[in-house]
Image: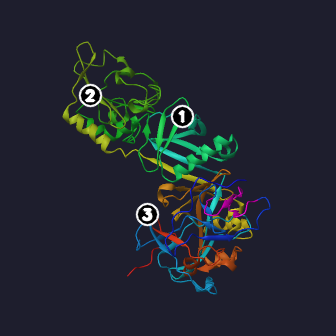
Amino acid sequence: MTEHTRTDGLPALDPGQGPPVLERARPRNERMAAGKIECNACPVLCQISTGKSGACDRYANADGVLVRVDPVVLLDRAAALGDGAVVPFLVRPSGDTGGPEAASEDRGLFVTGVGASTTYPDYKPAPFVVASRADGVDMVTVVTEGIFSYCSFRVKIDTDRYLGPEQANVRCNGEVVGHVTTAEYGSQMLSLGGVHHLTGGSKKEGRVTCEMMASLGNKSAVELDIDGGTRVVVQAGRAPVVDGVEEARMRVGCGSATVGIFAKQFHGLADEVVVVDDHITGVLSQHQAGRCLDMRASGVRIRGRRSTPGRYFQVANPGTGWGGTDILDPMSIVEGWDAGTAWPGLRLLMVSTTGEHAEWFVLDDALVPRREPLPDAVARVVSRIGDNCEPSLCTVLFVGGAGGSLRAGVTENPVMLTRSIKASLVNVTCGGAPAYVWPGGGITVMVDVARMPDRSFGTVPTPAIVAPIEFSMRLDDYRALGGHMEVVRSLDDALARGAWHRDGAPTGRRIDATLPENPWPLGRAPLLG
Protein backbone atom coordinates (compact mmCIF):
# COMPACT_ATOMS: atom_id res chain seq x y z
CA MET A 1 0.00 0.00 0.00
CA THR A 2 1.46 3.35 -0.94
CA GLU A 3 0.77 6.84 0.33
CA HIS A 4 -1.50 9.21 -1.52
CA THR A 5 0.23 12.20 -3.10
CA ARG A 6 -2.51 14.18 -4.86
CA THR A 7 -2.08 17.03 -2.39
CA ASP A 8 1.10 18.92 -1.58
CA GLY A 9 0.17 19.09 2.08
CA LEU A 10 -2.57 19.83 4.56
CA PRO A 11 -4.81 22.87 4.05
CA ALA A 12 -3.64 25.99 5.83
CA LEU A 13 -5.18 26.25 9.30
CA ASP A 14 -5.65 29.39 11.33
CA PRO A 15 -3.95 29.48 14.73
CA GLY A 16 -6.08 27.71 17.29
CA GLN A 17 -8.16 25.94 14.64
CA GLY A 18 -6.73 22.54 13.93
CA PRO A 19 -8.38 19.67 12.10
CA PRO A 20 -10.43 17.12 14.07
CA VAL A 21 -8.31 14.40 15.63
CA LEU A 22 -9.70 10.95 14.96
CA GLU A 23 -7.37 8.44 16.56
CA ARG A 24 -3.82 8.02 17.60
CA ALA A 25 -1.73 6.22 15.01
CA ARG A 26 -1.87 2.46 15.19
CA PRO A 27 1.37 0.61 15.97
CA ARG A 28 3.57 0.96 12.94
CA ASN A 29 3.55 -1.96 10.54
CA GLU A 30 7.07 -3.38 10.19
CA ARG A 31 6.88 -2.80 6.46
CA MET A 32 5.62 0.76 6.87
CA ALA A 33 8.17 3.53 6.34
CA ALA A 34 9.09 5.66 9.33
CA GLY A 35 6.94 8.73 9.78
CA LYS A 36 3.86 7.16 8.23
CA ILE A 37 0.61 6.26 9.94
CA GLU A 38 -2.13 3.92 8.85
CA CYS A 39 -5.60 5.36 8.37
CA ASN A 40 -8.37 2.91 9.28
CA ALA A 41 -11.30 5.13 8.28
CA CYS A 42 -12.08 2.79 5.37
CA PRO A 43 -10.87 -0.60 4.12
CA VAL A 44 -8.17 0.93 1.89
CA LEU A 45 -5.90 1.46 4.94
CA CYS A 46 -3.76 4.22 3.45
CA GLN A 47 -0.27 4.66 4.85
CA ILE A 48 0.15 8.42 5.09
CA SER A 49 3.32 10.46 5.52
CA THR A 50 3.44 13.53 7.75
CA GLY A 51 1.74 16.48 6.12
CA LYS A 52 0.01 14.35 3.49
CA SER A 53 -3.62 13.29 3.06
CA GLY A 54 -5.00 9.87 2.25
CA ALA A 55 -6.54 8.67 -1.00
CA CYS A 56 -9.89 10.28 -0.23
CA ASP A 57 -8.40 13.68 0.70
CA ARG A 58 -10.50 13.54 3.88
CA TYR A 59 -7.95 12.21 6.40
CA ALA A 60 -4.36 13.23 6.93
CA ASN A 61 -1.23 12.78 9.03
CA ALA A 62 -0.68 15.81 11.25
CA ASP A 63 2.57 15.17 13.11
CA GLY A 64 1.79 11.51 13.67
CA VAL A 65 -1.90 11.97 14.47
CA LEU A 66 -4.70 10.93 12.11
CA VAL A 67 -6.94 13.96 11.57
CA ARG A 68 -10.10 14.79 9.63
CA VAL A 69 -9.19 17.55 7.20
CA ASP A 70 -12.63 19.03 6.55
CA PRO A 71 -14.61 20.85 9.24
CA VAL A 72 -17.81 19.46 10.68
CA VAL A 73 -20.89 21.22 9.27
CA LEU A 74 -23.48 22.45 11.74
CA LEU A 75 -26.81 23.93 10.77
CA ASP A 76 -27.72 27.22 12.36
CA ARG A 77 -31.45 27.91 12.13
CA ALA A 78 -30.90 31.58 12.85
CA ALA A 79 -27.86 31.79 10.54
CA ALA A 80 -26.40 34.01 13.25
CA LEU A 81 -22.83 33.45 12.09
CA GLY A 82 -23.61 33.62 8.40
CA ASP A 83 -23.69 30.88 5.77
CA GLY A 84 -20.35 29.13 5.44
CA ALA A 85 -18.64 30.89 8.34
CA VAL A 86 -15.79 28.93 9.93
CA VAL A 87 -15.33 29.43 13.67
CA PRO A 88 -13.12 27.66 16.22
CA PHE A 89 -14.41 25.26 18.82
CA LEU A 90 -13.79 26.18 22.40
CA VAL A 91 -11.74 23.52 24.22
CA ARG A 92 -12.94 22.41 27.62
CA PRO A 93 -10.89 20.81 30.37
CA SER A 94 -10.25 17.11 29.76
CA GLY A 95 -12.22 16.10 32.84
CA ASP A 96 -15.50 17.57 31.58
CA THR A 97 -17.27 14.79 29.72
CA GLY A 98 -20.77 16.19 29.33
CA GLY A 99 -23.37 13.44 29.01
CA PRO A 100 -27.11 13.18 28.50
CA GLU A 101 -27.84 14.71 31.88
CA ALA A 102 -26.06 17.87 30.69
CA ALA A 103 -28.33 18.40 27.68
CA SER A 104 -28.70 22.13 27.10
CA GLU A 105 -31.75 23.87 25.72
CA ASP A 106 -31.77 23.90 21.92
CA ARG A 107 -29.90 26.94 20.62
CA GLY A 108 -30.89 26.36 17.03
CA LEU A 109 -27.80 24.29 16.18
CA PHE A 110 -27.83 20.84 14.62
CA VAL A 111 -24.73 18.69 14.13
CA THR A 112 -24.76 17.13 10.64
CA GLY A 113 -22.82 14.18 9.29
CA VAL A 114 -20.93 16.39 6.81
CA GLY A 115 -17.32 16.23 7.96
CA ALA A 116 -18.22 14.18 11.04
CA SER A 117 -16.11 11.09 10.17
CA THR A 118 -17.30 7.52 9.97
CA THR A 119 -18.11 4.52 12.16
CA TYR A 120 -15.59 2.36 10.29
CA PRO A 121 -14.22 -0.04 11.59
CA ASP A 122 -17.60 -1.38 12.57
CA TYR A 123 -17.05 -1.66 16.30
CA LYS A 124 -16.95 2.15 16.78
CA PRO A 125 -19.94 4.11 18.00
CA ALA A 126 -20.87 7.01 15.75
CA PRO A 127 -18.50 9.99 15.93
CA PHE A 128 -21.19 12.22 17.44
CA VAL A 129 -23.99 11.05 19.73
CA VAL A 130 -25.39 14.38 20.83
CA ALA A 131 -27.97 15.12 23.51
CA SER A 132 -29.95 18.33 23.22
CA ARG A 133 -33.34 19.66 24.24
CA ALA A 134 -35.97 20.68 21.69
CA ASP A 135 -39.23 22.24 22.84
CA GLY A 136 -38.57 20.90 26.33
CA VAL A 137 -38.02 17.33 25.13
CA ASP A 138 -34.69 15.54 25.73
CA MET A 139 -33.38 14.40 22.34
CA VAL A 140 -30.43 12.45 20.94
CA THR A 141 -28.99 12.79 17.46
CA VAL A 142 -26.59 10.11 16.22
CA VAL A 143 -24.35 11.59 13.54
CA THR A 144 -22.02 9.88 11.10
CA GLU A 145 -20.72 9.79 7.55
CA GLY A 146 -21.79 6.55 5.92
CA ILE A 147 -19.65 4.66 3.41
CA PHE A 148 -22.15 3.56 0.76
CA SER A 149 -21.46 0.93 -1.89
CA TYR A 150 -25.16 0.22 -2.30
CA CYS A 151 -26.22 3.64 -3.48
CA SER A 152 -27.32 5.40 -6.64
CA PHE A 153 -28.81 8.59 -8.00
CA ARG A 154 -32.18 9.07 -9.66
CA VAL A 155 -32.06 12.04 -12.00
CA LYS A 156 -35.35 13.63 -13.02
CA ILE A 157 -34.90 15.73 -16.17
CA ASP A 158 -37.82 18.01 -16.94
CA THR A 159 -38.06 17.85 -20.72
CA ASP A 160 -40.08 16.26 -23.49
CA ARG A 161 -36.94 15.87 -25.57
CA TYR A 162 -36.08 12.29 -26.38
CA LEU A 163 -32.91 11.40 -24.51
CA GLY A 164 -32.67 7.74 -25.49
CA PRO A 165 -34.57 4.45 -25.45
CA GLU A 166 -35.72 3.02 -22.15
CA GLN A 167 -33.07 0.68 -20.67
CA ALA A 168 -30.35 2.26 -22.84
CA ASN A 169 -26.90 2.50 -21.29
CA VAL A 170 -25.79 5.88 -19.96
CA ARG A 171 -22.07 6.57 -20.27
CA CYS A 172 -19.67 8.99 -18.64
CA ASN A 173 -16.22 9.32 -20.19
CA GLY A 174 -17.01 6.21 -22.22
CA GLU A 175 -17.85 4.00 -19.22
CA VAL A 176 -21.34 2.66 -18.54
CA VAL A 177 -22.56 4.33 -15.33
CA GLY A 178 -26.32 3.75 -15.46
CA HIS A 179 -29.35 3.47 -17.69
CA VAL A 180 -32.45 5.27 -18.91
CA THR A 181 -35.43 4.27 -16.81
CA THR A 182 -39.19 4.80 -17.02
CA ALA A 183 -40.23 8.28 -18.15
CA GLU A 184 -42.64 10.22 -15.97
CA TYR A 185 -45.13 12.95 -16.80
CA GLY A 186 -43.13 15.69 -18.52
CA SER A 187 -39.80 14.27 -17.37
CA GLN A 188 -37.16 11.83 -18.53
CA MET A 189 -35.58 9.69 -15.80
CA LEU A 190 -32.08 8.28 -15.40
CA SER A 191 -30.79 5.75 -12.88
CA LEU A 192 -27.08 6.32 -12.28
CA GLY A 193 -24.46 4.57 -10.21
CA GLY A 194 -25.26 1.59 -8.04
CA VAL A 195 -23.22 -1.23 -6.60
CA HIS A 196 -22.84 -3.16 -9.87
CA HIS A 197 -21.22 -0.20 -11.63
CA LEU A 198 -19.13 0.70 -8.58
CA THR A 199 -17.75 -2.76 -7.88
CA GLY A 200 -19.08 -5.21 -10.46
CA GLY A 201 -17.20 -4.02 -13.53
CA SER A 202 -13.68 -2.93 -14.37
CA LYS A 203 -11.59 -0.71 -12.10
CA LYS A 204 -12.02 2.15 -14.55
CA GLU A 205 -15.80 1.73 -14.58
CA GLY A 206 -15.87 1.83 -10.79
CA ARG A 207 -13.61 4.87 -10.61
CA VAL A 208 -15.54 6.83 -13.25
CA THR A 209 -18.87 5.89 -11.67
CA CYS A 210 -17.69 6.99 -8.24
CA GLU A 211 -16.39 10.32 -9.53
CA MET A 212 -19.58 10.92 -11.49
CA MET A 213 -21.74 10.19 -8.45
CA ALA A 214 -19.73 12.49 -6.18
CA SER A 215 -19.99 15.29 -8.72
CA LEU A 216 -23.76 14.87 -9.03
CA GLY A 217 -24.20 14.79 -5.26
CA ASN A 218 -22.08 17.90 -4.84
CA LYS A 219 -24.27 19.77 -7.35
CA SER A 220 -21.69 19.91 -10.13
CA ALA A 221 -22.42 19.48 -13.83
CA VAL A 222 -21.90 16.03 -15.38
CA GLU A 223 -21.87 15.26 -19.11
CA LEU A 224 -23.51 11.97 -20.09
CA ASP A 225 -23.89 10.11 -23.39
CA ILE A 226 -26.90 7.87 -23.93
CA ASP A 227 -26.56 4.91 -26.30
CA GLY A 228 -28.82 5.47 -29.29
CA GLY A 229 -29.78 8.90 -28.00
CA THR A 230 -28.40 12.25 -27.00
CA ARG A 231 -25.60 13.88 -25.07
CA VAL A 232 -27.00 15.60 -21.99
CA VAL A 233 -25.46 17.75 -19.29
CA VAL A 234 -27.20 17.43 -15.92
CA GLN A 235 -26.73 19.42 -12.73
CA ALA A 236 -28.92 19.61 -9.65
CA GLY A 237 -31.15 22.65 -9.75
CA ARG A 238 -30.12 23.65 -13.28
CA ALA A 239 -31.75 23.26 -16.66
CA PRO A 240 -30.55 20.23 -18.68
CA VAL A 241 -28.51 20.81 -21.80
CA VAL A 242 -29.52 18.37 -24.56
CA ASP A 243 -27.14 18.10 -27.51
CA GLY A 244 -25.75 21.53 -26.71
CA VAL A 245 -29.15 23.23 -26.34
CA GLU A 246 -30.29 24.37 -22.89
CA GLU A 247 -33.86 23.38 -22.17
CA ALA A 248 -36.25 26.10 -21.01
CA ARG A 249 -39.65 24.58 -20.30
CA MET A 250 -41.34 21.51 -18.91
CA ARG A 251 -44.54 20.77 -20.83
CA VAL A 252 -47.81 22.00 -19.39
CA GLY A 253 -49.34 18.60 -20.10
CA CYS A 254 -49.69 16.05 -22.87
CA GLY A 255 -51.36 17.10 -26.13
CA SER A 256 -54.75 15.98 -24.90
CA ALA A 257 -54.40 17.84 -21.59
CA THR A 258 -53.24 21.00 -23.39
CA VAL A 259 -56.29 20.85 -25.67
CA GLY A 260 -58.56 20.51 -22.67
CA ILE A 261 -56.92 23.28 -20.63
CA PHE A 262 -56.99 25.89 -23.38
CA ALA A 263 -60.03 24.77 -25.41
CA LYS A 264 -62.24 27.70 -24.37
CA GLN A 265 -59.47 30.18 -25.06
CA PHE A 266 -58.93 28.88 -28.59
CA HIS A 267 -62.67 28.61 -29.28
CA GLY A 268 -63.66 31.21 -31.83
CA LEU A 269 -60.06 32.04 -32.72
CA ALA A 270 -59.25 28.80 -34.57
CA ASP A 271 -61.38 26.20 -36.33
CA GLU A 272 -58.94 23.42 -35.44
CA VAL A 273 -56.06 23.08 -33.01
CA VAL A 274 -53.63 20.17 -33.09
CA VAL A 275 -51.24 19.90 -30.12
CA VAL A 276 -48.27 17.78 -31.18
CA ASP A 277 -46.92 15.45 -28.49
CA ASP A 278 -44.87 12.25 -28.44
CA HIS A 279 -47.28 10.76 -25.91
CA ILE A 280 -50.81 11.86 -26.87
CA THR A 281 -51.41 14.30 -29.71
CA GLY A 282 -54.64 16.21 -29.19
CA VAL A 283 -57.13 17.38 -31.88
CA LEU A 284 -59.52 20.00 -30.52
CA SER A 285 -62.63 19.53 -32.70
CA GLN A 286 -62.65 15.76 -32.11
CA HIS A 287 -61.73 16.00 -28.44
CA GLN A 288 -64.35 15.87 -25.70
CA ALA A 289 -63.58 19.53 -24.93
CA GLY A 290 -64.31 20.55 -28.52
CA ARG A 291 -67.49 18.54 -28.64
CA CYS A 292 -68.71 20.14 -25.40
CA LEU A 293 -68.10 23.52 -27.05
CA ASP A 294 -70.13 22.40 -30.11
CA MET A 295 -67.19 22.89 -32.44
CA ARG A 296 -67.73 22.04 -36.09
CA ALA A 297 -65.79 18.96 -37.26
CA SER A 298 -62.78 19.99 -39.35
CA GLY A 299 -62.24 16.77 -41.31
CA VAL A 300 -58.52 16.64 -40.51
CA ARG A 301 -56.94 13.16 -40.68
CA ILE A 302 -54.04 12.64 -38.29
CA ARG A 303 -51.37 10.00 -38.71
CA GLY A 304 -50.97 7.61 -35.79
CA ARG A 305 -53.05 5.25 -33.68
CA ARG A 306 -56.35 6.69 -32.57
CA SER A 307 -57.04 6.18 -28.90
CA THR A 308 -60.24 7.92 -27.83
CA PRO A 309 -61.82 10.77 -29.78
CA GLY A 310 -59.31 13.56 -30.39
CA ARG A 311 -56.40 11.61 -28.88
CA TYR A 312 -53.68 9.93 -30.98
CA PHE A 313 -50.71 7.76 -30.02
CA GLN A 314 -47.54 7.26 -32.07
CA VAL A 315 -47.97 10.15 -34.51
CA ALA A 316 -44.18 10.22 -34.94
CA ASN A 317 -41.01 8.77 -33.49
CA PRO A 318 -39.52 10.18 -30.29
CA GLY A 319 -36.95 12.92 -30.83
CA THR A 320 -35.88 16.47 -30.05
CA GLY A 321 -38.37 18.22 -32.34
CA TRP A 322 -41.96 19.30 -31.85
CA GLY A 323 -43.48 17.97 -28.60
CA GLY A 324 -40.67 15.47 -28.02
CA THR A 325 -41.12 13.93 -31.48
CA ASP A 326 -38.66 13.75 -34.36
CA ILE A 327 -40.70 16.02 -36.65
CA LEU A 328 -39.62 19.47 -37.77
CA ASP A 329 -42.58 20.11 -40.10
CA PRO A 330 -45.86 19.79 -38.14
CA MET A 331 -47.87 19.12 -41.31
CA SER A 332 -46.02 15.81 -41.69
CA ILE A 333 -48.48 14.25 -39.22
CA VAL A 334 -51.51 15.41 -41.23
CA GLU A 335 -52.52 12.75 -43.75
CA GLY A 336 -55.17 14.89 -45.42
CA TRP A 337 -58.65 16.36 -45.15
CA ASP A 338 -62.13 14.98 -45.60
CA ALA A 339 -63.38 16.96 -48.60
CA GLY A 340 -66.97 16.58 -47.47
CA THR A 341 -66.20 18.07 -44.04
CA ALA A 342 -63.37 20.59 -44.40
CA TRP A 343 -63.91 23.96 -46.07
CA PRO A 344 -61.83 26.70 -47.70
CA GLY A 345 -60.69 29.29 -45.18
CA LEU A 346 -60.51 26.79 -42.30
CA ARG A 347 -58.10 28.15 -39.69
CA LEU A 348 -55.64 25.61 -38.28
CA LEU A 349 -53.18 26.04 -35.41
CA MET A 350 -50.38 23.51 -34.95
CA VAL A 351 -48.69 23.95 -31.56
CA SER A 352 -46.40 21.97 -29.24
CA THR A 353 -47.03 21.14 -25.58
CA THR A 354 -44.64 23.87 -24.39
CA GLY A 355 -45.74 26.56 -26.84
CA GLU A 356 -42.16 26.76 -28.14
CA HIS A 357 -43.37 25.70 -31.60
CA ALA A 358 -46.48 27.13 -33.23
CA GLU A 359 -47.57 27.63 -36.86
CA TRP A 360 -50.79 28.96 -38.40
CA PHE A 361 -52.40 27.61 -41.57
CA VAL A 362 -55.45 28.51 -43.63
CA LEU A 363 -56.97 26.05 -46.16
CA ASP A 364 -57.15 27.35 -49.72
CA ASP A 365 -59.88 26.50 -52.23
CA ALA A 366 -58.21 23.13 -52.93
CA LEU A 367 -58.11 22.37 -49.15
CA VAL A 368 -54.34 22.76 -49.14
CA PRO A 369 -52.96 24.29 -45.91
CA ARG A 370 -51.10 27.56 -46.52
CA ARG A 371 -48.83 29.07 -43.87
CA GLU A 372 -49.80 32.53 -42.71
CA PRO A 373 -48.62 34.82 -39.90
CA LEU A 374 -49.86 33.87 -36.45
CA PRO A 375 -52.73 36.22 -35.44
CA ASP A 376 -52.02 38.28 -32.33
CA ALA A 377 -54.99 36.87 -30.41
CA VAL A 378 -53.87 33.29 -31.11
CA ALA A 379 -50.27 34.18 -30.26
CA ARG A 380 -51.41 35.37 -26.85
CA VAL A 381 -52.97 31.98 -26.08
CA VAL A 382 -49.84 30.20 -27.34
CA SER A 383 -47.82 32.46 -25.04
CA ARG A 384 -50.07 31.47 -22.16
CA ILE A 385 -49.26 27.80 -22.82
CA GLY A 386 -45.60 28.72 -22.32
CA ASP A 387 -46.40 30.76 -19.21
CA ASN A 388 -48.03 27.69 -17.67
CA CYS A 389 -44.96 25.54 -18.24
CA GLU A 390 -42.63 25.20 -15.27
CA PRO A 391 -38.90 25.82 -15.81
CA SER A 392 -36.99 22.80 -17.04
CA LEU A 393 -34.78 21.53 -14.21
CA CYS A 394 -32.65 18.56 -13.21
CA THR A 395 -33.52 17.04 -9.84
CA VAL A 396 -30.87 14.74 -8.35
CA LEU A 397 -32.01 12.27 -5.70
CA PHE A 398 -29.50 10.25 -3.68
CA VAL A 399 -30.65 6.73 -2.78
CA GLY A 400 -28.58 4.78 -0.28
CA GLY A 401 -28.90 1.65 1.82
CA ALA A 402 -27.80 2.17 5.42
CA GLY A 403 -26.21 -1.17 6.26
CA GLY A 404 -24.65 -2.95 9.18
CA SER A 405 -21.66 -0.82 10.14
CA LEU A 406 -23.69 2.35 10.04
CA ARG A 407 -26.40 0.89 12.26
CA ALA A 408 -23.80 -0.56 14.61
CA GLY A 409 -22.63 2.98 15.24
CA VAL A 410 -26.06 3.67 16.72
CA THR A 411 -26.73 0.49 18.73
CA GLU A 412 -25.20 -2.89 19.49
CA ASN A 413 -28.45 -4.47 18.27
CA PRO A 414 -28.79 -2.96 14.75
CA VAL A 415 -32.25 -4.38 13.99
CA MET A 416 -33.64 -2.20 16.77
CA LEU A 417 -32.70 0.93 14.83
CA THR A 418 -34.46 -0.42 11.74
CA ARG A 419 -37.59 -1.23 13.74
CA SER A 420 -37.56 2.14 15.48
CA ILE A 421 -37.36 3.97 12.16
CA LYS A 422 -40.25 1.97 10.74
CA ALA A 423 -42.21 2.74 13.92
CA SER A 424 -41.65 6.48 13.27
CA LEU A 425 -39.67 6.87 16.48
CA VAL A 426 -36.57 8.07 14.63
CA ASN A 427 -36.26 11.00 12.22
CA VAL A 428 -33.71 10.33 9.47
CA THR A 429 -31.94 13.25 7.81
CA CYS A 430 -28.98 13.58 5.46
CA GLY A 431 -26.96 16.69 6.14
CA GLY A 432 -30.03 17.96 7.98
CA ALA A 433 -32.21 17.57 4.88
CA PRO A 434 -35.38 15.46 5.18
CA ALA A 435 -34.94 11.91 3.90
CA TYR A 436 -37.65 9.55 2.68
CA VAL A 437 -37.24 6.03 4.08
CA TRP A 438 -38.47 3.41 1.62
CA PRO A 439 -40.99 0.83 2.84
CA GLY A 440 -39.97 -2.79 3.29
CA GLY A 441 -36.86 -4.23 4.85
CA GLY A 442 -33.67 -2.40 5.65
CA ILE A 443 -33.03 1.34 5.80
CA THR A 444 -33.09 2.67 2.25
CA VAL A 445 -33.17 6.45 2.23
CA MET A 446 -33.77 8.94 -0.57
CA VAL A 447 -32.93 12.64 -0.38
CA ASP A 448 -32.87 15.62 -2.73
CA VAL A 449 -29.23 16.73 -2.89
CA ALA A 450 -30.31 20.32 -3.59
CA ARG A 451 -31.64 20.46 -0.02
CA MET A 452 -28.35 19.29 1.49
CA PRO A 453 -25.35 21.46 2.42
CA ASP A 454 -22.81 22.07 -0.32
CA ARG A 455 -20.00 19.50 -0.63
CA SER A 456 -21.93 16.91 1.38
CA PHE A 457 -20.55 13.94 -0.58
CA GLY A 458 -17.12 12.37 -0.65
CA THR A 459 -15.57 9.18 -1.93
CA VAL A 460 -13.25 6.41 -0.84
CA PRO A 461 -11.25 4.45 -3.41
CA THR A 462 -12.81 1.07 -2.62
CA PRO A 463 -14.75 2.64 -4.55
CA ALA A 464 -17.73 3.92 -2.58
CA ILE A 465 -19.63 7.11 -1.86
CA VAL A 466 -19.42 8.89 1.49
CA ALA A 467 -22.62 10.65 2.53
CA PRO A 468 -23.90 12.19 5.79
CA ILE A 469 -26.74 10.68 7.77
CA GLU A 470 -28.29 11.59 11.11
CA PHE A 471 -30.78 9.75 13.33
CA SER A 472 -32.72 11.94 15.77
CA MET A 473 -35.00 10.60 18.49
CA ARG A 474 -36.11 11.07 22.08
CA LEU A 475 -33.45 10.21 24.64
CA ASP A 476 -35.70 7.56 26.21
CA ASP A 477 -36.26 5.92 22.82
CA TYR A 478 -32.50 5.86 22.21
CA ARG A 479 -31.97 4.15 25.54
CA ALA A 480 -34.72 1.64 24.75
CA LEU A 481 -33.20 0.60 21.40
CA GLY A 482 -29.90 -0.20 23.12
CA GLY A 483 -27.99 2.90 22.07
CA HIS A 484 -24.40 3.66 23.05
CA MET A 485 -25.38 5.62 26.14
CA GLU A 486 -21.79 5.72 27.41
CA VAL A 487 -20.79 8.12 24.62
CA VAL A 488 -23.85 10.40 24.64
CA ARG A 489 -22.69 13.98 25.23
CA SER A 490 -24.40 17.31 25.50
CA LEU A 491 -24.53 19.63 22.53
CA ASP A 492 -22.22 22.05 24.30
CA ASP A 493 -19.68 19.31 24.95
CA ALA A 494 -19.92 18.10 21.36
CA LEU A 495 -19.23 21.63 20.16
CA ALA A 496 -16.25 21.86 22.46
CA ARG A 497 -14.70 18.47 21.85
CA GLY A 498 -15.57 17.23 18.40
CA ALA A 499 -15.70 13.48 17.76
CA TRP A 500 -15.75 11.08 20.71
CA HIS A 501 -12.39 9.53 19.84
CA ARG A 502 -10.40 12.75 19.69
CA ASP A 503 -7.76 13.44 22.33
CA GLY A 504 -8.28 17.09 23.22
CA ALA A 505 -6.69 18.98 20.33
CA PRO A 506 -8.70 21.94 18.99
CA THR A 507 -11.07 21.35 16.08
CA GLY A 508 -13.07 23.49 13.67
CA ARG A 509 -16.63 23.64 12.47
CA ARG A 510 -18.60 25.29 9.70
CA ILE A 511 -21.99 26.82 10.35
CA ASP A 512 -24.48 26.70 7.47
CA ALA A 513 -27.92 28.22 7.40
CA THR A 514 -30.71 25.75 6.74
CA LEU A 515 -32.66 26.05 3.52
CA PRO A 516 -36.02 27.70 4.16
CA GLU A 517 -37.92 24.76 2.63
CA ASN A 518 -36.32 22.25 5.00
CA PRO A 519 -38.09 21.46 8.28
CA TRP A 520 -35.92 21.83 11.35
CA PRO A 521 -34.59 18.31 12.12
CA LEU A 522 -35.48 18.51 15.82
CA GLY A 523 -38.89 20.16 15.49
CA ARG A 524 -39.81 23.80 15.30
CA ALA A 525 -37.09 26.40 15.66
CA PRO A 526 -36.66 27.98 19.09
CA LEU A 527 -37.75 31.57 19.57
CA LEU A 528 -34.78 33.82 19.12
CA GLY A 529 -34.51 37.14 20.92
Residue identified by numbered label 2:
271
How much space separates mark 1 and mark 2, taking CA atoms?
41 Å
Tag in front: 1 or 2 = 1
Give the farthest residue toward the left.
Answer: 376
Q: Quadrant of residue 370?
A: top left
Is residue 272 rendered to the left or right of residue 302? left
Residue identified by numbered label 1:
226
- Residue 75: give x, y in percent of width and height: 48, 69
Q: Is residue 280 above or below residue 475?
A: above
Q: Is residue 295 above or below residue 448?
A: above
- Residue 189: give x, y in percent of width and height: 52, 42
380, 473: nearer the viewer:
473
How much space separates mark 3 and mark 1, taking CA atoms?
33 Å
Query: Which quadrant holds the C terminus?
Result: bottom left
Residue 292 shows in the view:
yes
Is 51 within the magenta? yes
- Residue 429: give x, y in percent of width and height: 56, 64
> How packed is label 1: few (under 14 Cα within 10 Å), some, or many (20 or more)?
many
Q: Quadrant of residue 505?
A: bottom right
Residue identified by numbered label 3:
515
Q: Quadrant of residue 182?
A: top right
| Element class at badge 1 | strand
- Residue 439: give x, y in percent of width and height: 63, 56
- Identify the residue at horizontal 77%, vertical 68% (top origin): 27
> How packed is label 3: few (under 14 Cα within 10 Å), some, or many (20 or more)?
some
* Bounds of the magenta segment: 32-53
